[in-house]
Amino acid sequence: MRILLVVSAFNSLSQRLFCHLRDRGENVGVAFAINDAQLIAEVETFFPDIIIAPFLKKRIPEHIWSAITTFIVHPGIAGDRGAHALDWAILNRSSEWGVTILRANGEYDAGDIYAHGTFAMPQGSKASIYRNETTTLAIGLVDELLEVFHEPTFIPLAQHENALSGSAHRAMTQSDRRIDWENDSTENILTKIRSADSHPGVLDTILGVECTLYGAHSEGRLRGGIKEILAKREGAICLGTRDGAFWITHLKERHQPSIKLPATYVLKDRLKGVMEDRLPLFVDPMVETFKEITYLERDEVGYLGFDFHNGAMGAHQCVRLKYAFDHLKQSGIKVLVLMGGEEFFSNGIHLNIMEDSKKSDEDGWSNIHSMNEAVKSILLCDEVLTVSALRRNAGAGGVFLALASDFVVAREGVVLNPHYQTLGLHGSEYWTYTLPRRVGEIKAHELTSSCLPISAVHAEAIGLVDTVLSEDEERYLPELHQYCKALYEDEERYEELLDIKRQKIHHTSFTEEIQRHREIELERMYPSFYDPASEFNRLRKDFVYKLCPIQTPIYLQGVGNA
């Protein structure tokens, strides 16, 4: 079937659906809804059997939906109508939410329902719930849609003829989320920020700076006055409330243009005298505070988590991760697992910090070297077996960080973007060594030049990952632990694998070989950082300022069968 995805942006749900449909064998295209004339032209060029809109901020022209069956994926329960559906569900503390697939007509979210379902609402940010529970349910509902689409006896659910649990609502405004510092509990404040994370944030004024707030984390120990800045840590600030405290990791100044940055980067000298509340290099993941690097040990397996905001890794974060890895590999465990973060495994270097820097070339160059050093530590590790566990999505350098491990596993449903060229970069992280080693030179070229996302299932089929574990969160972690235990329970096999690594590292030209790959990669990368007119510098600015595209990206135009 020829299926065209019409989107306002190629976001996480759109990419997951794109991969899923291609894995099913469908002929899938993508068109950005920029203006009516452009969209009509692209629809006519692709000539789809049906259109699915997984993420859309504007109406589809009647000229399209009246001629081609068109479905909207709405992130709300059956009957919910209007913008900011998930925002309202979080702010209202709904215990259950869902996804509805309806047929487009002339009325906003009012078409006949072809598939719908619900999930129990977790306590998380809007972005997290959207990427995880909402996306997982949406994929299953699209499968249902494609089944009933060919069923002549199927009768869709007419919204105007049935009593449904959802209802129409207005768009949410900043006044709906405004923090009442004198009266709101910590939990209320966290809920308001989570309802707006990662967009549009909650508007407030911190130390005289009007800005939007992102990345809220509860704090179990520090206490102080209402809205008092109690401490800072790794770019975040801790604020007092009437009954506790919480951390904010990122701010975005209200003035235009501006970008989202670590809070201390925005407040700068205004934080003079604020205590730096440091943590050890890694902490238990259950500690109630803002933390980036965590460690948990079970049996003889160590789990190293690195939860960096949006998966972006600045130079300092890369250094800390390397130090944690280097320490833990000598701690007596047998398997060390790179877990990534709660929302992303990793997306590579920190583009927003680079864009904000007055020395963006030097700071960016330092960032890529720091990332390379972290990857090198993993490649040269001969004390333990290493496993990268891709529980969440990964992109660019984050994918190649994962490939440095001896074994790579992925949770079903994870989407990988093993490429850099959408930002005009050649890339480093030793990818020219690790990627061909797994998939071969031809497939490596295809992955890095096509710039398309791939599913975990497809990644396993081509050898990019070793195995795919359950998408179900309750099954994934036990399956991962069993996988890791199996690596050392056969002691003879375990020692054999270590011996093979040690032989390669210490008695072959391996170290010199990967150094050559690094040098060639960096030689290709250098002009991208230091030439002010480089494509990377232009595309990075577009990316961090989230500039609206003027056309469907070239790499998505004309996409068809996998």
Image: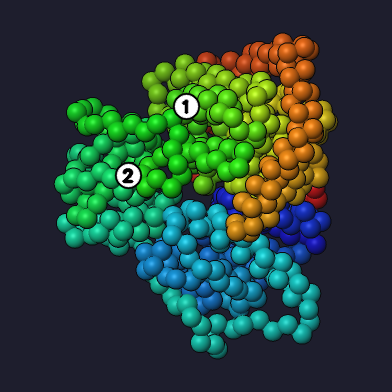
The foreground one among 80 and 300 is: 300
Q: Mark on residue 320?
A: 1
**Residue at 52% across, 15% down:** 530
The foreground one among 412 and 423 is: 412
- Identified by mark 1, the residue type is Arg
Q: Is residue 275 above or below residue 146?
A: above
Percent coordinates x, y for residue 24 in the rendering: 79, 58
- Residues packed near mark 1 inside 10 Å, few (<14), some (14 to 19) or many (20 plus): some
The foreground one among 367 and 37 is: 367
Kindly identify which residue carries mark 2: 247
Secondary-structure class at tag 2: strand
Secondary-structure class at tag 1: helix
Q: Earlier in the sequence, mark 1 or mark 2?
A: 2
Q: Is residue 158 left or right of residue 146?
A: left
- In the figure, residue 472 lies in which quadrant? bottom right
Residue 320 visible in image: yes
**Residue at 55% across, 54% down:** 131
- Identified by mark 2, the residue type is Trp
The N terminus: image quadrant: bottom right
Q: Mark on residue 416?
A: none
**Residue at 54% across, 37% down:** 304
**Residue at 62% across, 38% down:** 300
Percent coordinates x, y for residue 54 in the rendering: 60, 60
Q: Is residue 372 left or right of residue 190?
A: right
Percent coordinates x, y for residue 303 in the rendering: 57, 39
Q: Is residue 100 above or below residue 441?
A: below
CA gap, disc 1 and disc 2: 20 Å
Please identify, in this view, whether the residue under mark 1 or under mark 2 is nearer the observer. 1
Residue 204 visible in image: no
The foreground one among 486 and 76 is: 486
Q: Is residue 69 left or right of residue 82?
A: right
Labels 1 & 2 near each other (Cβ < 8 A)? no
